[in-house]
């Protein structure tokens, strides 16, 4: 319909009703390379459902109608119930029904971690908030499996593909979700500053039972059926990890009091909260004094999810920008035909594909960490990738939003949601500095890891597909610079932690692309990322002379 004063033209809606797997050559190739071709049919069907306009509408509704806390019932009894829009339940049921939560641990086929990562990546392009409880539930499984009695009671409910949103004791549910509680007001990332105390019930803790008293400043997500919580065993005592359900074994509500829900910048569909433990019932997991290593093991998995989730945000921002720029006209031709815009779009495409390759390689390391190189990828590269990929997502969602101009800067569009969502992965599970310090600690504790990692990267750079070129001089130079940086005295290296993590990731991405991507993509990435440190560079500030920009954009999104 036209307005009485003007006609509406040269306006195009954001992308939906498309197939996010069929239009992603890099992801399809990654699945085959990992031996996960068996998962392709199911992922294809899942992607078709995710790309529908109706699913995008569910994502918009779940983020517009945010969770509400109902502390009391109509008769004044404390219930701390969470109310979600029906769209949230539909999206969470969609993910659960794919069996992705348990696949890496329940499935024994090669490529199971790649298959999971692909499903997570596809879902995260449409809606990210629902992936928070999914992430924590999955990450809790390896820890719970070390507790035979507890695992026996939870296994079927954790592996279930049924979605059960009811707020009931675990024994009465078909499936459950798990969350985690680490952060306190005074400590933030410094978990050792926590003050929550767990006191044994009976002499020495009857069957490992404790009462927890204290608080958590960020408790994600409060609607979960149970949480893994870090607390001190006695005033000033050592830390331990506890399984704390919403309902006690006797069927009464546990004394985990939700004080309020966080009013977050993004991640709006998901609930995050502040809670107090008023002698809440908890079950000891592992040994006293091992609480922080236990919860850090869980965090190693959630950090992988942050990398995959940010890669998903980058992917969606990129395809939205390319789609729009091919249709929108300015100054006599399509935006995507204009040289400066082509540089921006190519830069987005390179960043997106590099993030995907890195995420899928990390997933492989989680499937088989039996060699020094695989352990190095898991222990060293995971925090480095979380630092870099998550930060790049924050910057580049803003750049992609700018491609859409004012149309991107409105709340009822996909770009605004991506922009608000991006920072959470950079902050959650350890901010940038924490990740860089973790990289340094891993290298100091396992010096052989750096050697194994560099050896593998060097081999990747000499892949037989590029044998004619032998050593790529820019990769070789970057590797030498990284080795020299690693030789810096420890007391000086901490201040260079971000430089080290950035160079490590860029070298890894360059090597992976050289081994696995078309020459147009690999050569463009190397030319634009390894020529300098990238410090101070903005998106699109690349020299496209000599680069096959058309091939890069056609691969990124053929639609």
Image (cartoon, rainbow, N blue to C red):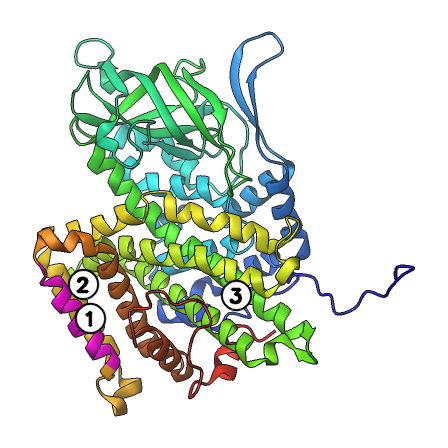
Which residue has dot 2 on it?
373
Q: CA distance from mark 1 to mark 3?
A: 30 Å
Closer to the eye: label 2 or 3: 3
Residue in the picture at 13% in, 62% down: 486
Residue drawn at (46%, 53%) of the image: 120
* Res. 43 visible in picture: no
Callout 1: few (<14), some (14-19), or many (20+) C-alpha neighbours within 10 Å? some
Read off the residue under disc 1: 456
- For label 1, the SS is helix
How many C-alpha atoms fall within 10 Å of the one at disc 3: few (<14), some, or many (≥20)?
many
Frontmost residue, 266 versus 496: 496
State which quadrant residue 474 falls in: bottom left
Seen from the viewer's position, the closer of residues 50 and 407 is: 407
Residue 483 magenta-highlighted: yes
Q: Position of residue 258 (x, y in %)?
A: 46, 21
Q: Are marks 1 and 3 in contact (CB under 8 Å)?
A: no
Q: Earlier in the sequence, mark 2 or mark 3?
A: 3
- The tag earlier along the polypeptide, 1 or 3, is 3
Q: Which residue is mark 3?
A: 318
Mark closer to the chain start, 2 or 1 = 2
Q: Nearer the viewer, residue 390 or 374?
A: 390
**Quarter placement of the N terminus:** bottom right
SS for tag 2? helix
Residue 546 place in picture, x, y as percent: 42, 88
Report whether 101 appears left or right of 380: right
Q: Dividing the image into 4 quarters, which one contains the C terminus?
A: bottom right
Read off the magenta span.
474-488
- Toward the right, the furthest residue is 4
Q: Is residue 30 part of the magenta span, yes or no?
A: no
Instruction: From this view, report whether residue 199 is shown above or below residue 383.
Output: above
Number of the label disc, if any, that sits on residue 120:
none
Above-or-below relation of 359 to 248: below
């Amino acid at each position: 319909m036209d307005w009485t004063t003007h006609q509406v033209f040269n306006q195009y809606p954001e992308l939906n009703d498309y197939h996010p797997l069929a239009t992603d050559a890099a992801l399809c190739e990654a699945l085959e390379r990992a031996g996960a071709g068996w998962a392709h049919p199911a992922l294809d069907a899942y992607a078709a459902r995710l790309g529908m306009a109706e699913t995008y509408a569910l994502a918009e509704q779940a983020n517009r109608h945010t969770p509400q806390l109902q502390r009391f019932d109509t008769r004044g009894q404390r219930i701390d119930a969470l109310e979600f829009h029906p769209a949230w339940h539909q999206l969470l049921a969609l993910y659960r029904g794919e069996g992705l939560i348990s696949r890496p641990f329940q499935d024994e086929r090669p490529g199971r971690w790649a298959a999971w990562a692909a499903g997570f990546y596809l879902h995260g392009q449409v809606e990210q908030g629902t992936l928070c409880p999914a992430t924590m539930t999955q990450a809790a499984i390896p820890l719970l499996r070390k507790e035979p009695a507890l695992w026996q009671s939870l296994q079927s409910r954790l592996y279930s593909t049924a979605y059960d949103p009811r707020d009931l004791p675990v024994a009465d549910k078909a499936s459950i979700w798990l969350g985690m509680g680490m952060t306190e007001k005074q400590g933030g990332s410094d978990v050792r500053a926590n003050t929550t105390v767990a006191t044994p019930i009976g002499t020495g803790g009857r069957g490992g039972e404790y009462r927890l008293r204290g608080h958590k400043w960020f408790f994600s997500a409060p609607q979960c059926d149970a949480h893994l919580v870090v607390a001190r065993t006695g005033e000033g005592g050592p830390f331990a990890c506890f399984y704390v359900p919403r309902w006690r074994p006797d069927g009464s509500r546990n004394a985990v009091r939700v004080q309020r829900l966080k009013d977050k910048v993004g991640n709006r569909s998901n609930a995050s909260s502040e809670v107090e433990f008023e002698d809440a019932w908890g079950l000891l997991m592992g040994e006293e004094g091992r609480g922080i290593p236990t919860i850090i093991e869980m965090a190693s998995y959630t950090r992988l999810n942050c990398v995959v989730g940010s890669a998903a945000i980058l992917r969606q921002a990129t395809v939205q920008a390319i789609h729009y720029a091919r249709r929108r006209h300015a100054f006599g031709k399509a935006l995507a035909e204009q040289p400066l815009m082509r540089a921006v779009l190519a830069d987005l495409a390179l960043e997106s594909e590099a993030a995907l390759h890195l995420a899928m390689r990390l997933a492989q390391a989680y499937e088989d960490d039996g060699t020094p190189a695989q352990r190095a990828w898991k222990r060293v590269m995971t925090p480095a990738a979380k630092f870099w990929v998550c930060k790049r997502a924050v910057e580049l969602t803003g750049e992609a939003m700018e491609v859409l101009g004012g149309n991107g800067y409105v709340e009822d569009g996909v770009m605004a949601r991506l922009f608000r969502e991006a920072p959470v992965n950079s902050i959650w599970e350890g901010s940038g500095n924490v990740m860089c310090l973790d990289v340094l600690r891993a290298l100091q504790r396992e010096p052989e890891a750096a050697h194994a990692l560099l050896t593998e990267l060097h081999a990747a750079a000499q892949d037989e597909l590029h044998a004619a070129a032998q050593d790529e001089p820019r990769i070789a130079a970057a590797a030498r610079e990284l080795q020299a940086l690693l030789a810096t005295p420890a007391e000086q290296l901490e201040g260079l932690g971000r430089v080290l993590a950035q160079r490590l990731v860029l070298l890894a991405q360059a090597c992976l692309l050289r081994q696995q991507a078309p020459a147009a993509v690999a050569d463009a990435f190397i030319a634009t990322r390894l020529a300098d440190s990238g410090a101070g560079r903005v998106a699109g500030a690349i020299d496209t002379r000599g680069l096959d920009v058309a091939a890069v954009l056609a691969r990124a999104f053929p639609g």
